[in-house]
Amino acid sequence: MTTRKTLLAAVAAFALLASPALAGNGNGGGNGGGHGNSGGSHGNSGGGNSGKSGTHGNSGTHGKSTHGKSASAKSGKKTQAAVDDVEVAATPKEKNLHAKLGRLNSLQRNINAYMNSKSKNFAAVQAYVMASANAQNAQAAVEAANQAVIDAQAALADLNEQLAEANALTPATPEEEAAKAAQIADLEGQIADQETAISDAEAAAAAAQTAADEAAAEVPSLDAALAEMANKPVDDEVTEWATGVLDDKIDQVAAKLAEQDAAAATTDDTTSD
């Protein structure tokens, strides 16, 4: 009896101990069923994950593609920079004009130097400027002489017109007749003088033209003058610059020489008086 009770108690205890396991198996079964469903879901999820994996694959490809483009862009920039470097190196920087002028920079000195300098290096350009100034003044003298001829001819024309009007007069009295005769004689004398003045003016104009031609012939070559003064090669750019500078200096020297000639002429007139 006691043994039987003990056996029943052991079975009961075993049953109690086994209950959680059985319950777990039941849950496991439930979970298993759920897992079965989950398996179906996993299949779907697998499809979903496969889609995601495909997307991830694309993402990986996209990453590689982006990296490829980035590398290409960087490579392009490096290539462009290299090309730019080559272009800059292939195109020499233009020298500063004043660096090319060298000794010719001194052409910008004032006119006193052009008129009075004793420098051997400057002598050729100085001679060119002085001769050019003299030629310019000589040509101005020709223009003035020609204008004097024109003015003299105009004056003669006016006198001839007055003479024609005097001859057309009809004196009413002997006194008027005498006045007319005196006027005509006076006009004829003026006309004779004016004709002489015209001849003199024409001779002066001819002489001025000869002097101008001679002065122009005495102007030395600018290219030769620059070459003699320069200590660096003289190219077209340098010659163009020098021409502009010297044209201004020639004008200034010509004006100064004209002033000196006018002053000398005034002095001569005063002495003569």
Image: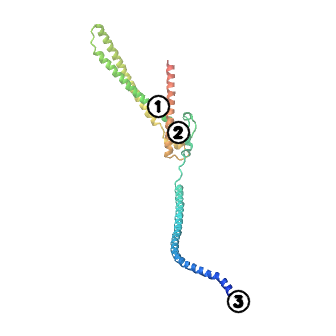
Label 2 vs label 3, nearer the camera: 3
CB within 8 Å, label 2 to label 3: no
Q: Residue at x 52, y 42 (%)?
A: 226
Tag 3: Cα neighbours inside 10 Å, few (<14), some, or many (≥20)? few
**Res 183 → quadrant:** top left
Q: Earlier in the sequence, mark 1 or mark 3?
A: 3
> In the displayed structure, would residue 89 be above or below residue 253?
below
Tag 1: Cα neighbours inside 10 Å, few (<14), some, or many (≥20)? many
Residue found at the far right of this picture: 2
Marking on residue 125:
2
Marking on residue 137:
1
Q: Earlier in the sequence, mark 2 or mark 1?
A: 2
Question: Is residue 115 left or right of 150 when viewed as pictured?
Answer: right
x then y, percent, for residue 253: 51, 33
CB within 8 Å, label 1 to label 3: no
Question: Is residue 197 left or right of 123 when viewed as pictured?
Answer: left
Q: Amino acid at mark 2?
A: Val
Q: Amino acid at mark 1?
A: Asn
According to the image, label 3 marks what residue? 5
The answer to whether one can see residue 195 in this image is no
Q: CA distance from mark 1 to mark 3?
A: 158 Å
Q: Nearer the viewer, residue 163 or 55?
A: 55
x then y, percent, for residue 46: 52, 75
